[in-house]
Amino acid sequence: MAQSGTDRKRESVIDENLRRVYDEALEEGIPDRFTDLLKALKEQDQAKDKEK
């Protein structure tokens, strides 16, 4: 089925907005609390491995 010009324009605007939001999310980085949590989990795994 052929798309109308309006549908293509709408999809183009949606695509642009999704790309913008995705790029902004990438620029935010990882919050410190998540980095700290990942570090604690890694240390916990290492401690478990040493017990074996």
Image (cartoon, rainbow, N blue to C red):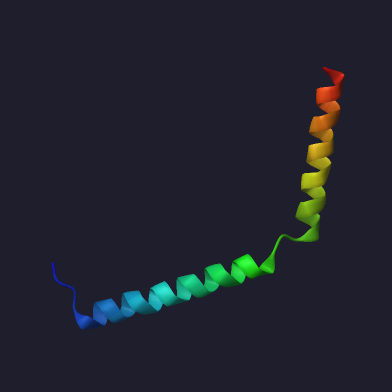
Would you place residue 12 above or below residue 43 in this image? below
The quadrant in which residue 22 appears is: bottom right
Which quadrant of the rendered structure holds the N terminus?
bottom left
Residue 13, x across and y down, in percent: 38, 79
- Which of the pair 10/45 is nearer the observer? 45
Judge from the rendering whether residue 2 lies leftward or rightward of residue 7; answer left or right. Answer: left
Judge from the rendering whether residue 49 lies leftward or rightward of residue 14; answer left or right. Answer: right
Counting the numbered discs, the total is 0
The quadrant in which residue 27 appears is: bottom right
Image point 79% across, 32% down: which residue? 45
Image point 18% across, 74% down: which residue? 3
Judge from the rendering whether residue 47 lies leftward or rightward of residue 24; answer left or right. Answer: right
Judge from the rendering whether residue 37 lies leftward or rightward of residue 11; answer left or right. Answer: right
Residue 31, x across and y down, in percent: 75, 61
Which quadrant of the rendered structure holds the C terminus?
top right
Residue 30, x across and y down, in percent: 72, 60
Q: Residue furthest left?
A: 1
Image point 86% across, 29% down: which residue? 47
Image point 82% across, 51% down: which residue? 36
Would you place residue 24 above or below residue 35 in this image? below
Q: Residue furthest top?
A: 52
